[in-house]
Image (cartoon, grey):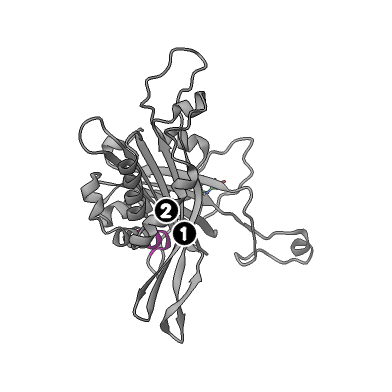
């Protein structure tokens, strides 16, 4: 679920670095893609959740790498078992809460660990609707974006552990057929793209956000599902614009900024928002057979492409977070 470089960035170095050139600098291990599903039964009405979990543990196991001494290694198989054990008692109602409790469980159980990183992705099953009614126990898989949470829990020498929680909404695909353009960009001998004030705008939103309150006790009482719904609504409503008129977008960059600002404006718990928006091009269909037959492109027939695509990313947060 994460790349090795992301994991390396994640596992901030707290080791005493060895002086020799080829010593172990840092190490961690864990289990990836642990899948678990939970049914919560409230009478005949069931709730269903499927999670994909990744665990990375740091601390105490350097000698397993350098000397083959596994005496302080929690087997990756054991890591997996903790996921199922927790699912038995935890409602699994939000990836954030599950990740937080799981990370705490590792630090609490194994005293030599200095850090537990847990990422939980929720598979987007939604309650089925039949004849306009919510079904009691049937679900369908949607392409409506999925929730993700990453918790980094660090044991401090004195006092309680510190925590960093990043929530995410991934792969939420959106499109609008007008009220989008791209003009005024650099023109030089390499430029071939014509300017336009009429085009399709399509993207797949990947959003990540951090929280203003970053203490374990504040996070334990946070209503993550309400926050998530608020973030989703802010992103979508900002991208779409009002239903009757829409809102003109002069570029993905401006849309992204407006979307992120809308999240911060509406959802008070959110601190910084990072958005990654691919620009999924729908090319005007001006193929030779159209031209030969005198058929004009009238903003009607397009050729959808997914490769290559533009990629526009930015973080929006308090001024103290700004690097620009
Ligand atoms: O909204 C856009 N932003 C860009 O940076 C860009 N670049 C491009 O070729 N088309 C677009 N569209």
In the picture provided, is 162 more to the left or to the right than 106?
A: left
Residue under numbered circle 2: 83
Please tell me which residue is depicted at 61% across the width and 46% down the height of the picture: 193
Q: Where on the picture, by quarter, is residue 47?
A: bottom left
Q: Is mark 1 within 8 Å of ligand 1?
A: no
What SS does tag 2 mark? helix
Residues 6 and 106: in front is 106
Find out whether residue 240 is within the magenta segment: yes
Examine the structure image and report whether residue 322 is included in the region drawn in magenta.
no
Give me the C-alpha separation between circle 2 and circle 1. 8 Å
Q: Position of residue 97 (x, y in %)?
A: 32, 54
Residue 45 on image: x %, y %: 37, 79
The residue labelled by disc 1 is 36
Which quarter of the figure is the C terminus placed in?
Answer: top left
User: In this picture, which residue range is highlighted in magenta?
Assistant: 234-241
Report the side of 283 relative to 39 (left or right). right
């Amino acid at each position: 679920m994460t790349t090795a470089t992301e994991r390396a960035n994640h596992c901030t170095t707290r080791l005493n670095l060895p002086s020799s050139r080829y010593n172990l600098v840092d190490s961690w291990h864990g289990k990836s893609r642990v899948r678990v599903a939970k049914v919560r039964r409230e009478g005949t009405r069931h709730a269903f959740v499927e999670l994909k979990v990744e665990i990375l543990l740091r601390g105490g196991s350097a000698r397993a790498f350098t000397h083959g001494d596994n005496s302080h290694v929690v087997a990756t198989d054991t890591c997996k078992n903790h996921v199922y054990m927790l699912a038995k008692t935890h409602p699994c109602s939000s990836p954030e809460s599950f990740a937080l409790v799981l990370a705490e469980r590792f630090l609490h159980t194994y005293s030599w660990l200095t850090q537990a990183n847990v990422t939980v992705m929720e598979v987007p099953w939604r309650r089925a609707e039949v004849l306009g009614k919510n079904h009691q126990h049937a679900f369908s898989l949607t392409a409506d974006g999925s929730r993700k949470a990453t918790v980094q829990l660090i044991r401090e020498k004195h006092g309680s552990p510190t925590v960093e929680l990043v929530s995410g909404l991934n792969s939420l695909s959106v499109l609008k057929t007008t009220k989008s353009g791209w003009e005024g960009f650099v023109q030089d001998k390499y430029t071939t793209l014509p300017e336009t004030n009429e085009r399709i705008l399509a993207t797949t939103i990947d959003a990540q956000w951090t929280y203003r309150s970053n203490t374990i006790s504040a996070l334990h009482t946070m209503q993550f599902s309400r926050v998530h719904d608020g973030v989703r609504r802010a992103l979508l409503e900002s991208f779409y614009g009002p239903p009757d008129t829409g809102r003109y977008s002069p570029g993905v960059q401006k849309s992204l900024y407006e979307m992120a600002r809308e999240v911060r404006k509406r959802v008070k718990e959110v601190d910084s928002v990072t958005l990654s928006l691919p620009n999924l091009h729908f090319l005007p269909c001006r193929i030779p057979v159209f031209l030969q037959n005198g058929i004009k492109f009238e903003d009607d027939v397009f050729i959808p492409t997914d490769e290559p695509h533009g990629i526009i990313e930015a973080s929006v947060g308090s001024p103290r977070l700004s690097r620009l």
